[in-house]
Amino acid sequence: MRRAIAPAHLRTVGPYSPAVQAGDLLFISGQIPLDMEGGKLVEGPVEVQTRRCMENLKAVLAAAGASLKDLVKVTIFLVDMKDFDAVNRVYGEFFDLEPPARSCVQVSALPRGARIEIEAVAYRP
């Protein structure tokens, strides 16, 4: 079974679903630091943008009846790998002893001029 998940107050920047549940897996589209209500990019340092990405990720998970504890894999995309340590500090605040597997890659650009994007996969048996 496959179903799209879309929190009512989350705006996307294109023709895609914020998340799709396929069986026990929830595939969450990349979250850039958009203000969920106004759909505008959150300005500020990468720490502020990281926190907004994580809050958006939490909102998508909640709409699917899941939480950060259900994540099994996260991929972080950064425009500048020099931001890695700052992103790591903020990201770490959202997890306790068992964070999900994770990759972090540098890309040349992200939608709307964001400095960071975070996508994830969750497991919901």
Image (spheres, grey):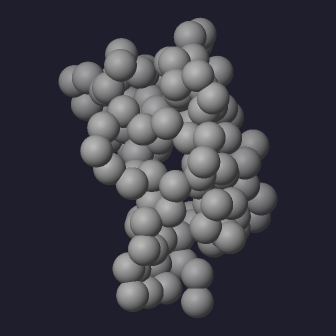
Q: Is residue 64 above or below residue 80?
A: below
| Residue drawn where x is 75% and y is 64% of the image | 97
- Using residue 12 as the reference point, say whether residue 39 is left or right of it: right
| Residue drawn where x is 31% and y is 26% of the image | 110
Taking the image as drawn, is residue 91 in sight?
A: no
Taking the view exactly as shown, the residue that stands out farthest to the top is 44
- Using residue 87 as the reference point, say whether residue 55 is left or right of it: right
Q: Quadrant of the C terminus?
A: bottom right
* Residue nearest the viewer, comparing 108 with 42: 42
Taking the view exactly as shown, the residue that stands out farthest to the left is 108
The x, y position of residue 58, in whole percent, is: 66, 51
Q: Is residue 75 above or below residue 79?
A: below
* Residue nearest the viewer, comparing 39 with 76: 39
Taking the image as drawn, is residue 24 in sight?
A: yes
| Residue drawn where x is 58% and y is 22% of the image | 38
The x, y position of residue 83, in whole percent, is: 48, 23
Q: Quadrant of residue 98?
A: bottom right
Q: Quadrant of residue 112?
A: top left
Q: Is residue 21 above or below residue 49?
A: below
